[in-house]
């Protein structure tokens, strides 16, 4: 049985799932990339469960997309003979189908707009993946959550994906597909945007 439900008043299964192992901790976290596809109605419903806060981790669109492709290929065929070729083929298919700019998980502007339409800004924290394991970022997150500071373990890797290089011709197509996302994030966060985002955005213009 699913832990989710369409009825706003019926969240017992989900809350039971969240509180498994709860023993008085100040914060309970539920983490999944799938929440990036939700709309304002769903975010409003989530926000009604206690004093829910939201942390949205933003990763450079090109890196995020290539990681998603590698994970998808791994899941479809873990023993694929040529992993690199399979990843490139999947990327090219997305490019040829013109689906890339429409993918909801890659549309940060849409997600942020839907979230901010119903959740007060003081309950939202935006974090760049590229800064995630810096000490100051972890301090900011802990302050936002109202918990004691936690030191990041930058050398710890969990669920690491298989390696494959992103060819330059595919990277160029990714830049074109995600151009509006780069513009939106750079306009929104300015100098706080990590250098990698700014480099990829600039390369689209000058490359």
Image: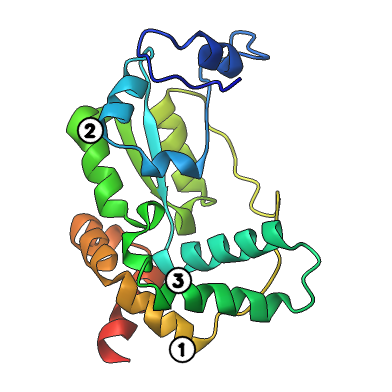
Image coords of residue 104 (percent x, y): 36, 52
- Which residue is more in the foreground, 60 or 150? 60
- Residue at image location 23% in from the left, 33% down from the top: 121
Q: Is residue 162 above or below residue 120?
A: below
Q: Is residue 92 left or right of residue 157?
A: left
The reply to whether residue 116 is visible in this rendering is yes
Labels 2 & 1 near each other (Cβ < 8 A): no
- Which residue is more in the foreground, 109 or 28? 109
Q: Which residue is mark 3?
A: 94
Q: Which of the two discs, 3 and 1, labels the residue nearer the N terminus?
A: 3
Instruction: Tell me which corner region of the image, top left, top right, bottom left or bottom right, holds residue 123.
Output: top left
Image coords of residue 5 (percent x, y): 45, 19
Labels 3 & 2 near each other (Cβ < 8 A): no
Label 1 neighbour load within 10 Å: few <14, some 14-19, many 20+: few
Label 3 neighbour load within 10 Å: few <14, some 14-19, many 20+: some
Which mark's residue is nearer the viewer, 3 or 2?
3
Is disc 3 placed on a helix, strand or loop?
helix
Instruction: Tell me which corner region of the image, top left, top right, bottom left or bottom right, holds residue 97.
Output: bottom left
Is disc 1 placed on a helix, strand or loop?
helix
Which mark's residue is nearer the viewer, 2 or 1?
1
Q: Which residue is mark 2?
A: 121
Instruction: Tell me which corner region of the image, top left, top right, bottom left or bottom right, holds residue 56.
Output: top left
Is disc 2 placed on a helix, strand or loop?
helix
Question: How far is disc 2 from disc 1 in space, using C-alphas?
Answer: 39 Å
Q: Is residue 163 left or right of residue 195?
A: right
Q: Which residue is mark 1?
A: 169
Q: Which of the two discs, 3 and 2, labels the residue nearer the N terminus?
A: 3
Question: How far is disc 3 from disc 1 in space, using C-alphas?
Answer: 14 Å
Q: Is residue 69 above or below residue 174?
A: above
Q: Is residue 154 left or right of residue 62?
A: right
């Amino acid at each position: 049985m699913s832990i989710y439900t369409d009825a706003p008043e019926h969240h017992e299964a989900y809350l039971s799932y969240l509180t498994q192992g709860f023993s008085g901790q100040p914060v309970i976290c539920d983490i999944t990339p799938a929440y990036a596809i939700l709309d304002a109605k769903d975010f409003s419903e989530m926000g009604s469960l206690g004093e829910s806060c939201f942390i949205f981790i933003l990763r450079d669109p090109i890196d995020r997309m290539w990681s998603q492709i590698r994970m998808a290929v791994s899941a479809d065929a873990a023993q694929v003979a040529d992993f690199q070729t399979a990843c490139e083929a999947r990327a090219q298919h997305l490019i040829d189908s013109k689906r890339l700019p429409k993918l909801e998980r890659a549309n940060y502007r849409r997600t942020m707009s839907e979230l901010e339409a119903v959740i007060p800004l003081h309950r939202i924290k935006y974090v760049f993946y590229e800064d995630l394991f810096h000490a100051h970022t972890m301090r900011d997150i802990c302050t936002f959550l109202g918990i004691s500071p936690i030191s990041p373990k930058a050398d710890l890797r969990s669920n690491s994906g298989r390696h494959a290089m992103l060819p330059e011709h595919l990277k160029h197509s990714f830049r074109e597909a995600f151009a509006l996302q780069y513009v939106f994030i750079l306009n929104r966060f300015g100098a706080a945007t990590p250098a990698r985002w700014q480099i990829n955005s600039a390369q689209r213009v000058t490359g």
